[in-house]
């Protein structure tokens, strides 16, 4: 199996791949890239486009496939398909499998642990996943339906970090400007029959209902709705990042931190704009519990009320916000001795 240079869809997707790599060149340097390849159309197209990109840029790449153990026979076929494609392209191949079938959340974390280990073994600077513009549009709609703010509306970031057992994994999603129709075309050009997950047609799942019903209806209103939603997500992410910077700067001179507490002058918190106070409190919570920790909209609203009126609020996970009669507001957690 080869990737003819004249194949238009493959060349187009490879170009988007190179643009994404260029946007993050400082973080990626010229290191090895590990491709997470499931065997579906999106990840197989990423593998094909990366092979062309690697040939042009002399960048080293490796492919990694993880079997979740939820569909044993399908897992074996998909692993074999990815292995054949990788070997035909001269891309090193690695595979792993869940030790025992798990629920979706458990399977996702098992996959991240495998990818972190594979990245360390290959000396990879980043793991590439094949999220597309369609995935972005679906995620935006799902999060807006659930009442997300700017951070949630920013949806899938092109580059982010994920902590796995103390190891920081850099995740790059270079296909966010590529449609699912593009990835299907890449596979067709190379004669690949990508894996199909029958559950993707089931209306039991919210994401499937958004893809199969909601987006189809919205496409009648705007044929370019996926690109419009993806563009909205990018703008929301940019605005979210700016507000985080403003929140950090607003209290940088007065915030005091220790391993178990963060404190501020009450007056500093009470004069913050409503858009910044929740972010200051969320940043403090993450400093106490780790980057993935969050208080949630309801608890943040309660915390803002306590800041304004005084009092004490349990934050869960042995955390507490205290705004007493003295000059300070204090967020703390109880640490085991």
Image (spheres, grey):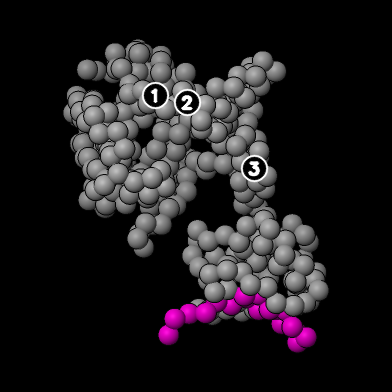
Residue 247 higher or lower than 106, as above or below: below
Mark 1 is surrounded, within 10 Å at the Cα level, by few (under 14), some (14 to 19) or many (20 or more) other residues, namely few
Q: Which residue is labeled 3 in the image?
A: 146
The answer to which of marks 3 and 1 sits earlier in the sequence is 3
What is the spatial separation of the Cα atoms under label 3 and label 1, in whole angstroms? 26 Å
Q: Secondary structure at mark 2?
A: loop
Residue identified by numbered label 2: 202
Where residue 227 sits, quadrant-wise, is top right
At 42% from the left and 47% from the top, the residue drawn is 105
Q: Is residue 3 left or right of residue 203?
A: left
Q: Marks 1/2: CA distance?
A: 7 Å
Residue pictured at 36% horizontal, 63% vertical: 166
CB-based contact (under 8 Å), mark 3 and mark 2: no
Q: Is residue 172 left or right of residue 190?
A: right
Q: Label 1, on which residue?
A: 198
Percent x, y for residue 143?
Answer: 61, 41
Spot occupied by residue 210 in the image (x, y as percentages of width and height): 58, 28
Q: Quadrant of the N terminus?
A: top left
Which percent across, then down, holds residue 319? 58, 73
Q: Residues within 10 Å of mark 2 (few under 14, many from 20)?
A: few
Whether residue 60 is visible here, answered yes or no, is: no
Which residues make up the magenta segment? 320-337
Which numbered mark, 3 or 2, is in the foreground of this view?
A: 2
Q: Quadrant of residue 219?
A: top right
Query: Is 278 a magenta residue?
Result: no
Whether residue 170 sits left or right of residue 113 in the image: it is right
Quick check: marks 1 and 2 in contact, CB under 8 Å?
yes
Secondary structure of the residue carrying numbered label 1: helix
Distance between mark 3 and mark 2 Cα atoms: 21 Å
Quarter of the image that includes the C terminus: bottom left
Vertical side of 110 occupied by 40: above or below: above
């Amino acid at each position: 199996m080869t990737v003819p240079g004249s194949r238009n869809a493959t060349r187009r997707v490879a170009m988007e791949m190179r643009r994404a790599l260029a946007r993050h060149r400082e973080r990626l340097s010229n290191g090895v890239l590990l491709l997470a390849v499931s065997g579906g159309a999106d990840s197989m197209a990423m593998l094909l486009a990366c092979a062309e990109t690697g040939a042009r840029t002399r960048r080293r790449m490796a492919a990694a496939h993880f079997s979740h153990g939820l569909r044993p026979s399908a897992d074996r076929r998909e692993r074999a398909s990815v292995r054949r494609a990788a070997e035909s392209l001269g891309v090193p191949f690695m595979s792993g499998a869940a030790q025992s079938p798990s629920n979706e959340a458990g399977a996702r974390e098992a996959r991240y642990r495998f990818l972190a280990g594979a990245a360390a073994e290959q000396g990879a600077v980043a793991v590439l996943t094949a999220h597309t513009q369609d995935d972005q549009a679906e995620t935006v709609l799902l999060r807006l339906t659930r009442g997300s703010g700017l951070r949630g509306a920013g949806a899938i970031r092109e580059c982010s970090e994920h902590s796995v057992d103390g190891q920081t994994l850099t995740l790059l999603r270079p296909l966010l400007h590529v449609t699912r129709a593009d990835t299907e075309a890449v596979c067709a050009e190379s004669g690949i029959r990508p894996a199909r997950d029958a559950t993707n047609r089931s209306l039991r799942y919210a994401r499937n209902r958004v893809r199969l019903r909601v987006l189809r209806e919205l496409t009648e209103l705007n044929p370019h709705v996926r690109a419009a939603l993806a563009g909205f997500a990018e703008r929301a992410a940019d605005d979210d990042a700016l507000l985080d910077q403003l929140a950090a700067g607003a209290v940088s001179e007065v915030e005091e931190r220790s391993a178990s507490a963060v404190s501020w002058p009450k007056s500093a918190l009470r004069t913050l704009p409503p858009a910044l106070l929740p972010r200051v409190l969320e940043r403090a919570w993450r400093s106490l519990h780790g980057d993935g920790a969050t208080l949630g909209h309801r608890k943040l609203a309660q915390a803002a009320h306590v800041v304004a009126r005084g009092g004490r609020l349990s934050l869960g996970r042995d955390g507490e916000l205290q705004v007493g009669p003295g000059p300070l507001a204090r967020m703390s957690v109880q640490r085991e001795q």
